[in-house]
Image (cartoon, rainbow, N blue to C red):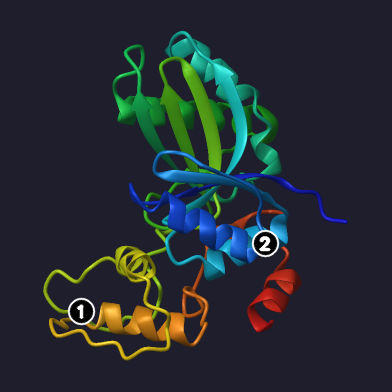
């Protein structure tokens, strides 16, 4: 039986109850609402399914480490101790996103650079080469969240934000975010059977999201790629089975 682990689905503020409901309907375990996020449990198959199906999630994170760090050198040491070779090969690429809520750590770009240095030095020691940085399309996107002096590191299983559905070929001026549109539809109480009218239709985002809800089409079925598809432990047959189910 596949082993479950804790995950974190990021969302817009106020969408936590809707996302939690989506996760429960999808089969997630131990669902807990946070602020701009909902935590839950599932296996790798459920992680694939969550990325494919959730309408109100922005991205799905897989936490891998939490620790206390009192300064930048402490942070560097703790990050370097993480066995990054489990998640990334020296020939692959990475990107690091950092969010800070701390008086000790105040510059997110500097922390991202420090973390990159720690990972690169670990790979140099092990393989005499290191992964490259690719901020646009990395093989592994790492999220760092620091609250005061408590550091949380996660792997981003989604890659690009999940509002990139993959169905758009052209846009109008300032189209509404797809995740926001889907969330507003779900909050409205529309049941997917009554007539739906969008008198201010621009790029048709509300109409497309409404049609996908009504037809029970997974939100990201048209998406070309997810972050987890570049992971070392990616199970392609399992993902294809979930997509075709």
Relative to 115, does residue 34 appear above or below in the rendering? below
Is residue 47 at least partly visible in the picture? yes
Residue 98 horizontal/vertical position (percent): 39, 34
Looking at the rendered image, the quarter that the N terminus falls into is: bottom right
Whether residue 236 sits left or right of residue 151 in the image: it is right
Residue 7 horizontal/vertical position (percent): 60, 46
Which residue, given by chain and number where applicable, does mark 2 sit on? 27
CA neighbours of label 1 inside 10 A, class few (<14), some (14 to 19), many (20+): few
Is residue 229 at least partly visible in the picture? no
Q: Residue at x 42, y 61 (%)?
A: 56
Whether residue 196 sits left or right of residue 135 in the image: it is left
Q: Residue at x 71, y 42 (%)?
A: 86
CA neighbours of label 2 inside 10 A, class few (<14), some (14 to 19), many (20+): some
- Mark 2 vs mark 1, foreground winner is 2
Whether residue 66 sits left or right of residue 9 in the image: it is right
Looking at the rendered image, the quarter that the C terminus falls into is: bottom right
Relative to 122, does residue 90 appear above or below in the rendering? below
- Secondary structure of the residue carrying tag 1 is loop
Residue 224 horizontal/vertical position (percent): 48, 75
Q: Residue furthest right?
A: 1
Gap in Å between the C-alphas at discs 2 and 1? 34 Å
- In the drawing, what numbered circle is on residue 171? 1
- Secondary structure of the residue carrying tag 2 is loop
């Amino acid at each position: 039986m596949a082993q479950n682990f804790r995950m974190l689905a990021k969302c817009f503020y106020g969408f936590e109850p809707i996302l939690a409901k989506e996760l429960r309907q999808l089969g997630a375990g131990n669902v807990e609402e946070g602020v701009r996020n909902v935590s839950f449990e599932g296996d790798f198959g459920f992680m694939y399914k969550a990325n494919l199906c959730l309408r109100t999630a922005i991205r799905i994170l897989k936490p891998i480490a939490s620790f206390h760090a009192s300064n930048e050198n402490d942070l560097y040491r703790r990050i370097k101790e993480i066995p990054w070779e489990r998640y990334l090969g020296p020939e692959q690429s990475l990107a690091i996103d950092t969010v800070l809520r701390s008086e000790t750590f105040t510059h997110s770009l500097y922390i991202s650079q420090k973390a990159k240095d720690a990972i690169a030095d670990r790979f140099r020691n092990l393989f005499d080469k290191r992964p490259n940085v690719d901020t646009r399309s990395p093989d592994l996107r790492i999220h760092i969240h620091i609250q005061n002096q408590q550091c949380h590191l996660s792997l981003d299983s989604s890659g690009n934000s999940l509002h990139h559905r993959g169905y758009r070929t052209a846009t109008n001026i300032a189209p509404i975010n797809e995740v926001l549109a889907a969330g507003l539809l779900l909050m409205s109480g529309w049941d997917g059977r009554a007539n739906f009218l969008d008198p201010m239709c621009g790029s048709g985002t509300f109409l497309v999201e409404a049609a996908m809800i009504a037809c029970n089409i997974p939100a990201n079925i048209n998406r070309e790629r997810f972050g987890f598809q570049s992971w070392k432990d990616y199970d392609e047959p399992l993902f294809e089975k979930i997509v075709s189910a």
